[in-house]
Amino acid sequence: MRRKMNKQKDEKIGFTKDQMIQMLRILEKNNNLVLAIEEAHHENNVDYMKLEQQLHFEKWKVNYISRRLRWVAKHYDLPNIVVTEEELEEQIRKTEN
């Protein structure tokens, strides 16, 4: 039984040198493709995180401006200046009719 194991280990795979070179070239090409995909994925993640930060900052600005506008409206007793989009649509419909 021990002889069979050694014999199996010593057997050649059966590929020629040219076939092995061709397989290595294919593996290298596929490896390079995977690396390129990973690099593109990383770059996309960086761009996505930048966009997330910009969106967060824009939301913060809108909230800040809304709060300031509400304060101005309350301070100068102008309740109709600060309205939601739905309330604005309602006011526009009323003026059109």
Image (cartoon, rainbow, N blue to C red):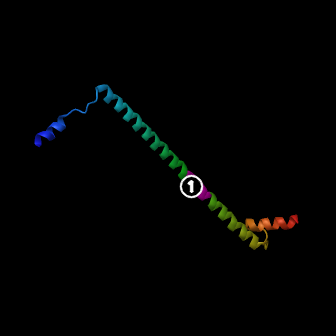
In the image, what residue type sits under mark 1?
A: Glu
Tell me where residue 46 appears, x and y as whole percent: 51, 49
Q: Which residue is pictured at 37% across the width and 35% down the height?
A: 27
Which one is in front, 89 or 77?
89
Instruction: Say which residue label 1 marks.
Output: 52
Left or right of 70, for residue 92: right
Q: How many marks?
A: 1
- The region drawn magenta spans 50-57
Left or right of 95, for residue 1: left
Q: Which residue is pictured at 65% across the width and 64% down the height?
A: 63
- Kindly give the residue lying farthest to the top in the view shown: 18
Q: Quadrant of residue 86?
A: bottom right
58 to 94, vertically: above or below: above
| Label 1 neighbour load within 10 Å: few <14, some 14-19, many 20+ | few
Tell me where residue 48 appears, x and y as whole percent: 54, 51
Tell me where residue 70 appears, x and y as whole percent: 72, 69
Which one is in front, 59 or 84?
84
Viewport quadrant of the N terminus? top left
Which one is in front, 54 or 5?
5
Q: Could you say whether the residue bearing mark 1 is in a helix, strand or loop?
A: helix
